[in-house]
Image (spheres, rainbow, N blue to C red):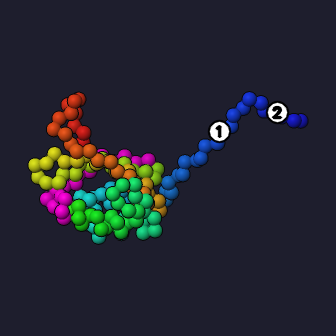
Amino acid sequence: MTTFLTGCTFVVLNPIKKFKSTKTMKTAKEIVMNYMQEVWVNRRVDAIDRYISPQTFIQHNPNLDNGREALKQFLPYLFGTIMPQGSWEVKRVIAENDLVVVHSLAVAASGHRGTAVVDIFRVDDNQIVEHWDLSHEVPDTTRSGNPIV
């Protein structure tokens, strides 16, 4: 018996890489939340090595190089020069598989409205391996009357 297929289009989609999940592994959300708390909220630059992959850290921020060393060099400048009296507050965290999105408010100094920041992290094997971010200064008012953070 011969089967003929005519007028068919076959679409092959790349399967979504499933995040490894075992009882010994932390979830991507836990890893990123701990990283944000220790490194960004508590300003513990020395904690970077626990969370950022030493082999692969792909950085999509246009002002930083790839690799965790670039981040370790930048953060003392950020915390010490740009926002020595500032604060970082995580407002929202959304996670799906190996991706985690964090919406934060960064305030350089008391009395400033701050900057809304959205970070996207990719986690693999219990470490952060990739990062994207966007930021927007918090305006005095918004057209809708709703805050941006």
Is 88 magenta? The answer is yes
Give the farthest residue toward the right. 1
Residue at image x 17%, y 35%? Answer: 141
User: Residue 58's image quarter?
Assistant: bottom left
Q: Secondary structure at mark 1?
A: loop
Q: Is residue 77 visible?
A: yes
The image's mark for residue 11 is 1
| Quarter that holds the N terminus | top right
Q: Residues within 10 Å of mark 1 (few under 14, many from 20)?
A: few
Q: Is residue 67 above or below residue 146?
A: below
Mark sitting earlier along the chain (2/1): 2
The circle on residue 78 is none
Alpha carbon separation for disc pair 2 and 1: 18 Å
140 relative to 131 in the view: left or right: left
What range of the chain is rendered magenta? 80-96
Question: Residue shown at 13%/54% (left/top)?
Answer: 109
- Where does residue 75 sit, x and y in percent of width and height? 27, 64
The C terminus: image quadrant: top left
Compared with 98, 142 (above or below) is above
Q: Name the residue that disc number 2 marks.
A: 4
User: Could you tell whether 140 is left or right of 36 in the image?
Assistant: left
* Residue at image location 47% in from the left, 59% down from the top: 124
Label 2, secondary structure: give it.
loop
Q: Residue furthest front?
A: 63
Where is residue 102 shown, x and y percent of the image? Answer: 33, 49
**Where residue 111 sits in the image (x, y, percent)?**
10, 49
